[in-house]
Structures are given as C-alpha cells and as structure tokens.
C-alpha cells in the first residue's frame, strides 16, 4: 500500500508514542522492521530516544541502514523524531558515533554553562525559518516538548526549518525535499504536535508540491 | 526560551485516582484518563501518576490505566510507585509512560539508576527523593524511604548528587516537612539540591498557591513544580498559576486557547 505510514521498529523508546500520535490523526500506521515494508511505505517515520551508539547499533543489527538510506535517496516522505533526526547527520559527539550521513552536520553536546541544566527538558519555542506544509496552522514560536542532551548542527542554513534556543541557538527542525526531522517530540507536544503529525501525513499522502527551499523571511 | 513546567500529580490506587479530586464537570472524578485529558487541556506541561496499589496482583490495573492514558493524552507523563527492576521500567515505558520514577528501590539498590539509564536513557529515569530537615542542624536534610516511613541516614544533597551521577535525568524532590501543609515548598532544600546537580529538579511538597511556586522556581532554582491538592480541589487552575508566574517574569508555556483538535 503506497499510502501506508511505516514506523521503523528498532526498539526505540518512543516508538509506541509516535505510532499512537499517527493513529490519532488518522494515519493507521504499521510498525515494522521489514525492508520490503519500508521500501513500499507511503511515508516512513524514524523515532528514537537514548544514546546515539545504541541507535546506530540497533539500526545496523536489524539491517535497516541501507533500506533507510535508499528510501531517503529516492526522495520519498520521511519524518525523523529526536534521535531519528540526529541519526540522519554525519556524526555525533556522543561517543564519536558515525551516523547515517543523509544530511550535512553533526550532533554536539550542550555547552557547560552556569545554570544550564542538561538534559534540555521541557517545553521550548520553535521559530520557523520558512513556510512548509508540515507547519501549516502552527504559528512560529509555538511550544514543543524537548528532552535531549545533544543538539543538531548543520553547515547548510537552507535545511533549517525550525530554530530553538537553549544556551545555544540550534536547528530544532530540519527539512529537505520530502524529508522532515525534528529534535523535539511532537507526539508529546499536545495539540500543536498532533497538528504537525496531521500535516505530515496529509502532505505525504497528497504529494503536495515541494516547499520553496529556504525562502528566508 | 525553555519554560518552567507545572505538573499536576495524582495518587492512583488500582487504576483509580484517590484523595478526593473535586473538579466540576467531570463525569467521573476517579478516572485518571479523564482527569489527565482535562489537565492537558488546561495547560499542564506534564503529569505524574504515583501508583499506591499495594498488591502485585492488582498492578495490572495500573498497566491498563497507563495504556489508556497514553492512547488519549499527548503530553509527557511519569509513573512512579512499585517500580523495582528494569523489567518494571520497560513495562511502563512500553505502555506509554515518558518517564518512570524510582525512590525506595533506588536507595536499596543504587545500581538500578545506572542500569535503567543505560538501558532506556537518562531522560526517562526520575529519582524521587523524600527528605526531612535534620533537627538542630541547619542546612541538612535526611532521605527517607518507604513512602517517608523509614530514615535512611543518607544526606539528601549527597544522595541527589549521586543519583544524578549514576544517570538520573531528573530529580523529584519532596520535602516531608512542608508536604501537605500548603504553606510553601522547602525553598532552601530545593536550592541546595538544584545548585548541586546538573539535571533538572522538580519541586514537590507544600504548594498552597502560585506565590509558593514562584518562590520554588526563583529562590529554589527548581525547573518544575509539582502540586496535587490545589489543582484537584480547584483552589487554583493551571491557567491562574501560569498567569501569576508570567506576571512575575517566570517563563511558562501559555495555556493553549480552547479550539478544535486536529
């Protein structure tokens, strides 16, 4: 089924929460680690929490790295959440871990600063840098739930759909073509988070036109 | 900007909310799912369920409650009470809890913090600390276990530091001196712990009104405040608390306006 939303099953902690949010917005997702299901997905979602090394090991052990790379390379609808974003970059400072390298950039630890608690845990604002189908109806500066100790960076400003500030300003939502990835957890971000999932599902299904890249405001 | 969190807490026994919740317009004030949804709409940033179910056989009711909550509530929630092993943690996290809270089990077997953090990530391991002032020794608090019934000899600040070092992603700090009195949190305790650890601290015990929460978040350096009675009895709404805190310049997530859900 070409319009099937597939959530990648690799023992990620937020797997069920992501699937529940997708179900809530009417996506009827399946949870699978089967490369054939992944190849046939209408939209693919990579959840993830925890450590970078565990994430990459779990993906590798399940033979998921090539199927994910191939799927993304074909330019098809993809959503990464939290560690599912970090895994897309080239590498992570967390244990010097090599990641998928689908997007340019690396993952860095929050800087040590007085009063800056790590993990970055709680609701923080995300400011949109350009218009995109997944942010429709969600005002710039809306609050999303975050919980992470490492943050993404990228040398390519055209990829930065959303930005958040916590000690440093970091790209909290990345987008390129039909790929979107969020450091925050829309599945735990109340109504705006559900709207984000609903937008993603509709965009993936309808094959909405590509957003105009980085038409910066 | 990262906002300070307001966290209602429920005591749950055999899948039902206990300790009289007197919300108006609720069909069933003992239904955790209905209450959780209500609080989500009102702007709660997270929820904590403390399971006080005594018998292991009845724990299945807790599992049902956690699963039902996760189906319908889309903000993070923590489950504590009765979690003694990583297997217990796994059940709660898989059912949909964002975090698990451990207290007595962590004191008895501190390695449980490490193994939980290694297996599931620090972000979902909350260590709850019940502390009481040591009489005659200013600036010292002793940790109590077993729901506050047993003194442990542990210094609360030292235990907090150790718990964070072992991998706790967050500490839930309850003052037994102020708990239940609604006269304010133990700000000195909160500050002592918050300044000693690199992880977020949730203040608990003693909330009587928004001014107490403001004190915990400013002077106490807490990252979040937990309260039960003042919300459950309708003394203050979450909106009122947030408006008070915002007026004091404390960053909070505004209560979302009531409208259609996607």
Image: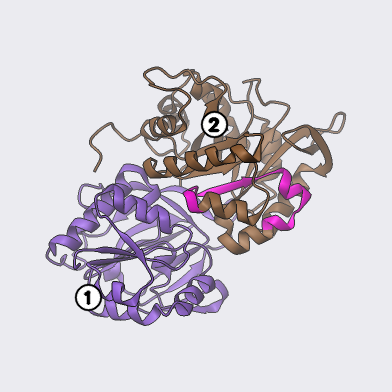
Q: Quadrant of residue B9?
A: top right
Residue picked out by circle 1? A75
Instruction: Name above or below for residue B13 compared with residue A20.
Output: above
> Which of the numbered marks, if any, corresponds to residue B10?
2
> Which of the numbered marks, if any, corresponds to residue B207?
none
Instruction: Name above or below for residue A167 compared with residue B221.
Output: below
In the picture, the quarter occupied by the N terminus of chain A is bottom left
Residue A153, percent across and down? Answer: 41, 69
- Residue B100 can be seen in this image: yes
Judge by depth and name the residue closer to the eye, A197 or B182.
A197
Q: Are marks 1 and 2 on the same chain?
A: no
- Asked whether, in this view, residue A66 is left or right of residue B192, the answer is left
Numbered range of the magenta stretch: B94-113
Q: Residue at x 78, y 32 (%)?
A: B149
Residue B109, percent across and down? Answer: 76, 53
Residue that sits furthest to the right in the current view: B136
Judge by depth and name the residue closer to the eye, B139 or B65.
B65
Sort mark 1 into few (<14), some (14-19) or many (20+) by Cα contacts within 10 Å: few
Q: Residue at x 38, y 21 (%)?
A: B27
Q: Subunit of mark 1?
A: A
Q: CA distance from mark 1 to mark 2?
A: 46 Å
Q: Nearer the viewer, mark 1 or mark 2?
A: 2
Is A11 magenta? The answer is no
Q: Residue at x 53, y 22 (%)?
A: B230
| Colour of the chain lettered B | brown
Q: Subunit of mark 2?
A: B
Residue B108, percent across and down? Answer: 78, 49
Q: Residue at x 25, y 55 (%)?
A: A27
Chain letter, purple = A
């Amino acid at each position: 089924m070409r319009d099937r939303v597939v959530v990648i099953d690799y023992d990620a902690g937020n797997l069920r929460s992501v699937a529940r949010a997708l179900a809530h917005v009417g996506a009827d997702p399946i949870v699978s680690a089967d490369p054939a299901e992944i190849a046939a997905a209408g939209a693919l979602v990579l959840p993830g929490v925890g450590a970078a090394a565990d994430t990459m090991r779990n993906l590798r052990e399940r033979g998921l790295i090539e199927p994910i790379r191939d799927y993304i390379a074909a330019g098809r609808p993809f959503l990464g959440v939290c560690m599912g974003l970090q895994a897309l970059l080239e590498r992570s400072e967390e244990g010097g871990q090599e990641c998928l390298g689908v997007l340019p950039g690396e993952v860095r630890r929050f800087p040590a600063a007085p009063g800056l608690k790590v993990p970055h845990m709680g609701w923080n604002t995300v400011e949109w840098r350009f218009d995109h189908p997944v942010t429709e109806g969600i005002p710039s500066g809306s609050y999303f739930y975050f919980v992470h100790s490492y943050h993404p960076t990228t040398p390519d400003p055209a990829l930065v759909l959303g930005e958040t500030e916590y000690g440093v300003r970091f790209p909290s939502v990345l987008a390129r073509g039909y790929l979107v990835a969020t450091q925050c957890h829309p599945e735990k971000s109340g109504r705006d988070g559900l709207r984000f999932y609903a937008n993603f599902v509709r965009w993936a299904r309808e094959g909405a036109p590509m957003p105009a890249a980085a038409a910066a405001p | 900007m990262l906002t300070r969190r307001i966290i209602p807490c429920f005591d749950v026994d055999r899948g039902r909310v206990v300790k009289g919740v007197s919300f108006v317009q609720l069909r069933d004030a003992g239904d955790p799912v209905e209450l959780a949804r209500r609080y989500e709409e009102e702007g709660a940033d997270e929820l904590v369920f403390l399971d006080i179910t005594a018998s292991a056989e009845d724990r299945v009711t807790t599992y049902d409650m956690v699963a039902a909550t996760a189906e319908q509530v889309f903000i993070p929630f923590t489950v504590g009470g009765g979690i003694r092993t990583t297997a217990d943690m796994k059940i709660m996290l898989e059912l949909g809890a964002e975090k698990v809270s451990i207290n007595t089990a962590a004191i008895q077997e501190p390695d449980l913090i490490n193994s939980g953090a290694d297996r599931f990530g620090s972000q979902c391991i909350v260590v709850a600390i019940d502390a009481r002032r040591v009489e005659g020794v200013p600036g010292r608090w002793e940790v109590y276990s077993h729901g506050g019934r047993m003194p442990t000899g542990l210094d609360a600040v030292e235990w907090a530091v150790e718990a964070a070092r072992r991998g706790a992603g967050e500490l839930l700090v309850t003052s037994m001196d102020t708990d239940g009195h609604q006269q304010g949190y133990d700000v000195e305790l909160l500050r002592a712990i918050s300044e000693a650890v690199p992880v977020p601290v949730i203040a608990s015990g003693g909330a009587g009104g928004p001014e107490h929460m403001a004190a915990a978040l400013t002077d106490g350096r807490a990252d979040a405040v937990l309260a039960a009675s003042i919300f459950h009895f309708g003394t203050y709404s979450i909106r009122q608390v947030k408006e008070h805190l915002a007026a004091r310049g404390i960053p909070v997530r505004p209560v979302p306006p009531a409208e259609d859900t996607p």
